[in-house]
Image (cartoon, rainbow, N blue to C red):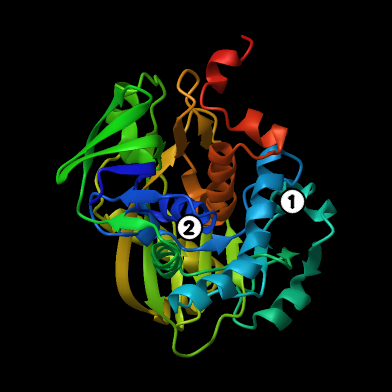
């Protein structure tokens, strides 16, 4: 381990690995420290939906940021594979946001105004997915949404960054960050290193480090439980979504059903009640889901901020301390745009001012009450 890096990234989930990749592409000397193994915490429990429309009405700042990130994957899938040899499982096909009531359809009013979203009636939905519930009334078909396999994508970012010159350290926990002249001393369980810049990509696990650097914000864990299943009889062609539950087909033939939302739960175990809820929601969309075989279950802690938007940017008083945390349900989707934005901060490149303002670390203090 070297004594000095231009940039130290703390956290080896998909956000941290994306940041390391974009920095390494720019020939920045970067070291990434992960306390466990790459992509084994929150990233490993994600479904991998790249649904820019799924949780936005298409009219806010987070949507434009999400769309730019989603579109970046189209080139990244080949770029990362060429470097790392890891297939990220990029899968097109779109998302069907199912409608079972007039109230469901009303909630989709803004979404249906988007040019890449099309209303399908019941018969059209049945043609696309013959095993869909007979109770469905229609669906908003989001044609350009897609998915990836999160762990493979995270590993591909990390390995590509390493090939481009980044140093990746696993099972090496950062427990303290101190100012040292114009630099920072990063204390880890396997020794100390200095850095000109430090990036916190710690997810929900960074609250203790936040306090050390004078940040009052805390990330709240929202546990998400999911099921990974085998579907051997009827292949699902599209991601299905209804009432915050999704069924995502993967390129390896498995499907992901998720996810519960349990606030302030720091445990990473999966509850029987959570499994029951997911199975019932899946059955309401696809009655044949009852025949699927469970491969395994996962739980991850989504990092939630006070307003639901991530923190991406510089410390309000220490410009060489940067934060990229709080992506909540959208870490996989937002990873490329976040990685590039942090890289642009460090290199002093021009950035979208709306994004900079929307994701400021100190935005709570600037709000008018």
- Dividing the picture into quadrants, the one containing residue 184 is top left
- Location of residue 319 in the rendering, given as x and y in whole percent from the top left corner: 49, 26
Badge number at residue 21: 2
- Residue at the bottom extreme of this rendering: 233
255 up-or-down from 215: above or below: below
Would you say residue 306 is visible in this rendering? yes
User: Which residue is at 51% across, 68% downward?
Assistant: 247
Pair 1/2: label in front: 2
- What residue is at 34 percent from the left and 59 percent from the top? 39
- Give the distance between the C-alpha atoms of the residues marked 1 and 2, in whole angstroms: 36 Å
Horizontal side of 294 relative to 95 (left or right) equals: left
Provide residue 171's location: percent of width, then percent of height.
20, 54
**Which residue does the numbered mark 1 point to in the structure image?**
108
Identify the image quadrant of residue 174: top left
Label 2: state its secondary structure.
helix
Residue 88 visible in the snapshot = no
Q: Is residue 89 left or right of residue 129?
A: left
Specify the quadrant of the image occupied by residue 263.
top left
CA neighbours of label 1 inside 10 A, class few (<14), some (14 to 19), many (20+)? some
Residue at x-position 20% and y-position 49%: 172
* Circles 1 and 2: CB atoms closer than 8 Å: no
């Amino acid at each position: 381990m070297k004594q000095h890096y231009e940039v130290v990234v703390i956290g080896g989930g998909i956000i941290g690995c994306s940041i390391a990749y974009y920095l390494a592409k720019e020939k920045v000397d970067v070291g990434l420290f992960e306390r466990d193994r790459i992509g084994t915490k929150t990233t490993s429990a994600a479904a991998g939906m790249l649904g820019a429309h799924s949780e936005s009405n298409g009219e806010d700042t987070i949507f434009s940021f999400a769309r730019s990130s989603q579109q970046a994957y189209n080139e990244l899938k080949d770029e990362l594979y060429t470097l790392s040899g890891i297939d990220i499982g990029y899968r097109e096909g779109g998302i069907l946001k199912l409608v079972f009531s007039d109230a469901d359809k009303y909630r989709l009013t803004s979404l249906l105004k988007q040019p890449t979203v099309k209303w399908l009636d019941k018969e059209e939905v049945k043609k696309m997915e013959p095993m869909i519930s007979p109770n469905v009334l229609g669906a908003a078909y989001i044609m350009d949404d897609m998915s990836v396999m999160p762990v493979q994508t995270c590993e591909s970012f990390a390995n590509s960054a390493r090939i481009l010159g980044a140093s990746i350290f696993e099972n090496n926990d950062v427990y303290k960050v101190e100012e040292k002249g114009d630099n920072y001393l990063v204390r880890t369980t396997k020794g100390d290193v200095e850095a000109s810049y430090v990036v916190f990509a710690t997810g929900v696990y960074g609250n203790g480090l936040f306090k050390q650097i004078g940040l009052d914000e805390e990330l709240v864990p929202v546990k998400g439980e999911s099921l990974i299943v085998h579907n051997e009889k009827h292949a699902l062609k599209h991601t299905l979504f209804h009432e915050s539950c999704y069924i995502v087909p993967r390129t390896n033939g498995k499907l992901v059903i998720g996810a519960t939302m349990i606030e302030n739960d720091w445990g990473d175990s999966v509850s029987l009640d959570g499994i029951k809820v997911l199975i019932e929601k899946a059955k309401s969309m696809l009655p044949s889901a009852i025949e699927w075989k469970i491969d395994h279950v996962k739980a991850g802690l989504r990092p939630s901020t006070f307003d639901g938007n991530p923190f991406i940017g510089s410390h309000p008083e220490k410009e060489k301390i940067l934060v990229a945390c709080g992506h909540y349900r959208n870490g996989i989707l937002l990873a490329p745009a976040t990685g590039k934005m942090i890289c642009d901060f460090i290199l002093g490149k021009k950035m979208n001012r709306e994004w900079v303002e929307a994701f400021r670390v100190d935005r709570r203090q600037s709000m008018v009450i």
